[in-house]
Image (tube, rainbow, N blue to C red):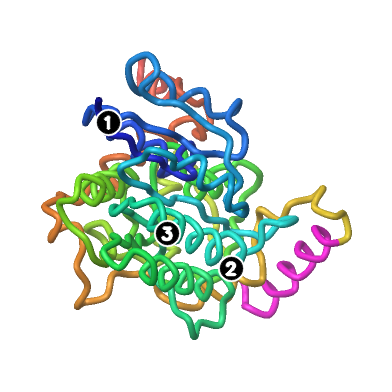
Amino acid sequence: MSKLVTIYGGSGFVGRYIARRMAKEGWRVRVAVRRPNEALFVKPYGSVGQVEPVLCNIRDDASVALAMSGADAVVNCVGILNQVGKNKFDAVQHEGAERIARLAAAAGIHTMVHLSAIGADADSDTDYARTKARGEAGVLEHMPNAMILRPSVIFGPEDDFFNRFANQAKFGPILPIAGAETKFQPVYVDDVAQAAVKGILGETTGVYELGGPEVKTLRALLQDMLTSIHRRRLILNLPFVAAWLAAFGFDMLQTITLGLFTNSIVTRDQLKSLSVDNVVAEDAKGLAELGIQDTPLSSILDSYLWRFRPSGQYDAIKNSAKNLG
């Protein structure tokens, strides 16, 4: 019988790419998610019955253990950018990650890949980075041979980075941001998936920081995005005080409405993160050490941001028509 991998958060942005690649490797894939009915799109990644979504609550021992029953490897792709309801940073990114590693070790599973983030630091000012670091420590305590992946901002068709800003750019001449000069090293989602597959197959272990071939400021990345969607906008870098006041207002609105309004714009914790560069450390192992060719942003961006152009898929045709006659 073929081997089985359980991917926690396997229907998410990164998880689905790992699931697809593992199905191609011939493995059975169990996609552990909160809402299996919303993850049915993963089933065609493999042959009939090869890829199956299952119910799992990462905050519950019994649920996590059941999802990994009979597995040969586990992958944790669960992470959040904003705390909503019971899904707090510590509960998900620290305790949840440690729970998967602890139960996997108890079940005799020896292979684990954990998706963390560049900037994970137990002494960080941000809750996000602190809990990412605690999650790593919890994983390594129980699974010392686990593979830890720390990507910079990840881009791809389903990303919450370029898609979000491109959508905002549709509604006016100004694109307000904070941290315009903060540096990022965007990495393609399928490159991250390839790295995870190497860990699942047991080809390597250890900590890898993943970034693409280019380091750019947030301003420069958004200018690339605007070029791709054929729109001219003024990128306005807000002072951190003004941005903090806006973030505070959005956070309070989420609290007052008991989560009916979710702050998907910017939180105070995210603002703190924007004050620190998000690039691969000079002494870190990365994609090159894994034998993976990093994919440039320019080769992918147009393939999924075209829908934000003024005329969508017809934009190029309309521009060409202007030159007739």
Quickly name the residue at label 2. 270
Quickly name the residue at label 1. 27
Which SS does the magenta portion mostly show? helix
Question: Measured along the vertical axis of the image, is residue 228 above or below residue 148?
Answer: above
Q: Which mark is residue 101?
A: 3
Q: Which mark is residue 55?
A: none
Percent across and percent down for residue 141 are 38, 72
Residue kind at label 3, given as amino acid type: Ala
Q: Using a 10 Å C-alpha cutoff, classify the residue at mark 3 as few (fewer than 14 neighbours), some (14 to 19) or many (20 or more).
A: many
Residue at the spot 45% in from the left edge and 26% down from the top edge: 52
Question: Measured along the vertical axis of the image, is residue 36 above or below residue 153?
Answer: above
Q: Using a 10 Å C-alpha cutoff, classify the residue at mark 1 as few (fewer than 14 neighbours), some (14 to 19) or many (20 or more).
A: some
Q: Which-is-in-front pick, marks 2 and 3?
A: 3
Horizontal placement of 96 versus 301: left or right?
A: right
Bounds of the magenta span? 238-255
What's the CA distance linking mark 2 and mark 3? 27 Å
Say which quadrant the N terminus sits in: top left
The foreground one among 314 and 104 is: 104
- The answer to whether the residue labelled 2 contacts the one labelled 3, judged by CB atoms less than 8 Å apart, is no
**Residue 18 is drawn in which quadrant?**
top left
Q: Would residue 44 be counted in the magenta stretch? A: no
Residue at the spot 48% in from the left edge and 81% down from the top edge: 122
Question: Measured along the vertical axis of the image, is residue 264 above or below residue 303?
Answer: below
Q: Which-is-in-front pick, marks 1 and 2?
A: 1
Disc with the residue nearer the chain's start (2 vs 3): 3
Percent across and percent down for residue 318 are 44, 21
Percent across and percent down for residue 309 are 49, 33
What's the CA distance linking mark 1 and mark 2? 37 Å
Label 2: state its secondary structure: helix
Residue at the spot 59% in from the left edge and 74% down from the top edge: 127
What's the CA distance linking mark 1 and mark 3? 21 Å
